[in-house]
Amino acid sequence: MSPAEISLLAATVLFVGGHFLLSHPLRPALAGRLGEKGFSLLYSLIAFAALGWMIVAWRQVGETFPLWIAPSLVWWAGSFLMIPALVLLVGSLIRNPAFPHPGAPPTQIPPPRGVFAVTRHPMNWAFILWALVHLSVYGTTRNIIVAGDILILAFFGSIGQDRRKAAAMGAAWTDWQARTGFFPFGAQLRGKLRWRTAFLPGWIPLIAGTLLWLLITWWHAPEVSPIAVYQDFSWLLR
């Protein structure tokens, strides 16, 4: 590996490892000593420092010869898979019902709605889908390092969140877990929720997520934009 690639790897390890350490084993001691506000400030400083380092290192690595390049069909499929990913991301910011007061009775947590009816970790699954899409379409060194680490962080971070909240909230979180799914559509497959709840995440996530997808696609990957896909398949409409 080149020095720039080693720097990028170190930055991503700091970003992912720092998140795990500060969110789990180190959190109680640091929060007790610094207070919640002080701990949040420390957490944010480390996260933004690592993210800034990642951005600088990413640019230094530059484009390298890819180990693989997916065929066009995979690029298009990956592009459209980002629509539900962005819907999950936007919806995760709207009315999360999973934050009752610690120790509150399970009945105080409203039924899962919106994207939380799809999965109780919509933001993390948005990043998981993003990572899987980017890993599948383009195998450059910097893409593998960053997308691979984000995949690890989002998946195992979700597991860690479940464990931490179960310890902090007791029966309230246990009941919430039973009524929701870790994996997308898990609650529907187990018969806990009706399928219509998964396909009606709300107009705001649907519209905002789709508009965000159009904007990112236009800026980031014009070769898989809706216009390019239409042009490639326009002969089918003749």
Image: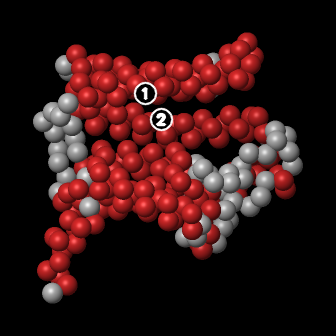
**What kind of element bears circle 1?**
helix
Q: CA distance from mark 1 to mark 2?
A: 13 Å
Q: Amino acid at mark 1?
A: Leu
- Residue nearer the viewer, 179 or 55: 55
Q: To which residue does mark 1 refer?
A: 51
Q: Amino acid at mark 2?
A: Leu
Q: Is residue 14 left or right of residue 132?
A: right
Q: Position of residue 36 (x, y in %)?
A: 72, 23
Outermost residue to the top: 33
In the visual, does 33 lie left or right of 205? right
107 left or right of 114 in image: right
Residue 194 found in image quarter: bottom right
104 vs 211: above or below: above
Which percent across, then down, holds residue 8? 31, 23
Classify mark 2: residues with Cα within 10 Å, few (<14), some (14-19) or many (20+).
Answer: many
Q: Which element is circle 2 on?
A: helix
**Image mark for residue 153:** 2
Q: Residue at x 72, y 53 (%)?
A: 97
